[in-house]
Amino acid sequence: MPNLADLVAVHSPQGRHAFATGEGALVSLFRVEGLTRVYGRPEGHVSPELLKRLFDALSGFFQGPGHRLQWTLARDPAWAQPVMEAHFAALDAQAQRLGLHHAGFTRGAPVDRLRDHFLPERSFLAFWTEPNILTPADLKQERKGLNRALEGVTWGPWQVLDPGLGLRGLIPTHEAACESLLEVLGPGQNQVGLRLVRMDTRESLAAWRQMLDPARGQGALFDAENPPCMTDPFGPALPQIARQVLPAYTTVGTTTGQGETIAAGGRYYRVLSMGMGPARQVDFGELFAHLPRDLPWRYTLTLTADNGSGWLKSFLAGVLSWSNALNHGITRARARIQKNALLGDPACVMQMLACTWGSTPEEAAENARRLAQRFEQWGNTVIEEVFGDPVPDWVALAPGLRPKGNARWHGLNLSDACAFVPVASQASPWHAAPLLLRGPQGQVLPVAIGSSRQKNFNIAIFAATRSGKSVLLALLLILAHILEPGRVRLPRFAFLDVGYGGMGAGQFLRELLGAQADLIQTHRLRNTPEYAINPFDTLLGQREPLALHRAFLIDFLTLVCTPMGQKEPPEHVYEMAAGLIDAAYPFYSDQHPEGQPKRWNPGQSGMTDVDTAVENGISTGDLPPAPSWWQVVDYLFERGDTVAAYAAQRFAVPLLADLPEVANVAGEAFKAFRKIPIGGRDGLSVFDFMMHLITQAQVQYPVIAAATAFNLGAARGVILDLNEVTAGQGGDADKRTSVFYLLARWVTVGQWFVHTDDLDQVPERYLAYHTERIREILEDPKFAIYDEFHRTNGSVSARRVVDRDARENGKFNIRLAIASQVPGDFDPQFLEEHVATRFILSAPENTGPLAQTFGLNAEEERLLKKLNGPGPHGSPILALLDTREGPYRLFCSDPVPLEWLWAFNTTSEDRAVYQRLLQHMSAAEARALAAERFGASAKRMIENLARSNVQAQTSDGATAAAADQLAQSVLTEWHRDWVLRALESLGYHTKEGEAA
């Protein structure tokens, strides 16, 4: 058997991204992260569009000799463990940085459960430029130059040749070809759509070692830019590439009656090759979809141009049968291939190798048997053990180290060879991110929501009821936003929901925060004075609203003055609303020459401390005998009591109830609106119409009729359940929903829309205070979630506010997610221009309108039929991600540890059981117990028990009784186990299955 190092053709780096061989050839390694688009497989299992694009992309490299491709894809279930450990280590570090209690969250059972969902892959492409691409004369001259360079090289047992010994004439050709390869295979409208990353020499060494000697780890890897030190194991000389990537030794043995087994680096390998091609047309995706999840394997395809040399004929025993349906001899089959080549389909030769491994020779042999069986089912492909010594082929399985193995070669045209290219998986724009989605075969797809790769930070989610929307929103909030790496304080967020989904995520976060739970507030908003919210509130000390606040107030007032049942306001209402807003603030300002600021009125609810401070100020002469509220605000702020100053300012700013007075006093400004009839008809004027609706709104919506009473304090995250204030149907419910959506939006995120550019509008005495505050708010990433947005029923005013938020939020470091069950809630042009991240979780029977709204192509629309609700690996999702490098389209799912799922669960039956468990144990214990006992849901068990409950008078009563019964049975077991554990801790031992 030859020396193992002699099997490695590559021996010296050539620049930062290439290696040279002893013959002067150049090779570069690319990491293949997957496809950025989805391809259809309409009939059978062939992807015609993918094959065509691969052919168009690669044909230029095979029109003549000189280039070689080696493409590998590998999968091993054992890789999930380190991937999950690294992922959760990053989450755990960020959780600790924010002060979250991570036990049972980023450690323990959830980590183990999530690992089982994923099956990581590793794919690489080696691109060779060989000396035969040069003319004979040029090649002769280049070899002379190489020989002269070699004369000055010092040889030694621990050295490689000096870096940069490739044929000089090949270097520009190779670099240009690598750039072209990245372009034609990469993302783009007419390209294949692969995400490729050209690896530097050190990354390539690490990849080769991981393939051939993974037990050695990733330390002590050296190239020209990372030379060894005197204290390194190899000494100061640059070690041979073979010594860096190959195991110390390999042995080859025969497993009784089962072929040759390679022992290397603590593993046992079996190598297979394709003896005869498939009997029908196939593609790699068909094989990939049917390989067992628990089977480790590597597949490598080597492809080069057929230069027509006579020696090759003796090796072309495997001619594809679909290229040779009549089973001609090699000569006639070769003529057929050459004929196709003349028609533009290059003639190629191909070698296909595969291997599998195990911890024992027997395991490796069994895995080889299973792998061969799967290959044979792939169009009746003939798979055989490699003849003779399998080690050269084992090395050739690592692309870029060796140009070919000893296994059988196959002659075919490039169009047929494309079917064997190992491209089937999807790519994420991110190599690592806090949220992991799952590809159809278990691929790891990291996803971020605030990355510089994205065109903007807006998210649109279309999902019907019970399609997994609440879980996805919770994952986006907790993982993608809150646990985004690098934050030193809890990121801000606001979650407007209708139902329990957001509340469950909020309670989960409060539990994780422990003593800091007040940083997260969850409320069920009610239409009562106790929850009063005045949208006219301004920044502390600010007498007038900022520009975006003014725009919001105009839209809010326009909505209030839009009749029930109408989506658009009557003509001229918007203009008068703008006039009222512009008149109200100067009217009550103490800095306007004609202003009539509101006077301090002691005895307001909750203002005892303020009243005492004002009385002291009056007695000391710091305040006049009858100060205005604005004077009180300034006085309290100067004393350093900003909390009291904020409280006082609530009574200084205008209220909705003040607008009729403002309109009547400023009569000339609104004179024209008194003459314009509403709707262009005789009758009520625009002025009277608006005054009527404003007065009516104070009765209908007590929450906006008084000074702000709803205090969120220092909360950095707020979840508001709007279920009560949006209940009902009809015009009244639609308008009420829109009003409360905008009101909730104002109280939660209104203060986020501030920028350092706004400081020039801040009063001098408040400048230092707001400079620091605005800087902190601007630095913090913020996430606004508007769930169930379809409940606004197309209100023009509500949509205008949200559209403006989406257009402006990048300037304020805000991420925005809008979720709806109605496709019409999303404007196609708005989605295309302002929403870079879109998730579709369900589809109606008629998918046409949804596909048109989201701009889906035919294949993406076909995938909508597969969005059929939560399954074992989470909810299926069609993710549309627009990045600065191009669009990404992923068909994926969102696996969730069962313990987390019970925190986010919105199913009423599951909530009933969970709430009963919470009465007896902590939330973490209740989630763990529910996950262990019921898995993802107890709904089916409850329904079965409810049907058998003949005593219940109603279905609700039967469900409640079933939930009680189920919870009690679990609690009985839990108490018994607790007693047994307690007795064992005291030294008592019980027989298995017996009570103590």
Image (cartoon, rainbow, N blue to C red):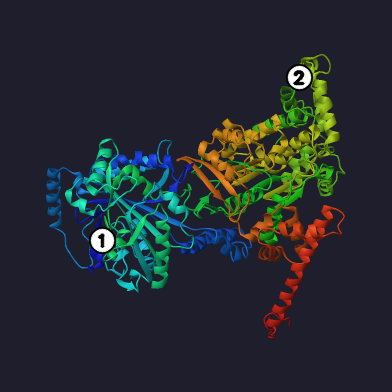
Q: Quadrant of the C terminus?
A: bottom right
Query: Percent position (x, y) of residue 422?
Result: 39, 51
Left or right of residue 728: residue 990 = left
Where on the picture, by quarter, is residue 408?
Answer: bottom left
Mark earlier in primary sequence (2, 1) = 1
The residue sitting at 46% across, 46% down in the picture is 45
The residue to which callout 1 is attached is: 8
Label 1 sits on what residue type? Val
In this rendering, the answer to whether 248 lies above or below 534 is: below
Left or right of residue 463: residue 858 = left
Where on the picture, by quarter, is residue 160?
Answer: bottom left
Q: Secondary structure at mark 1?
A: loop
- The answer, for residue 660, to whether it is visible in the render is yes
Q: Secondary structure at mark 2?
A: helix
Which mark is on residue 669?
2
Mark-to-mark CA distance, 2 and 1: 87 Å
Q: Quadrant of the N terminus?
A: bottom left
Label 2 sits on what residue type? Ala
Along the line of sight, which residue is nearer the eye, 962 or 337?
337
Along the line of sight, which residue is nearer the eye, 849 or 459?
849
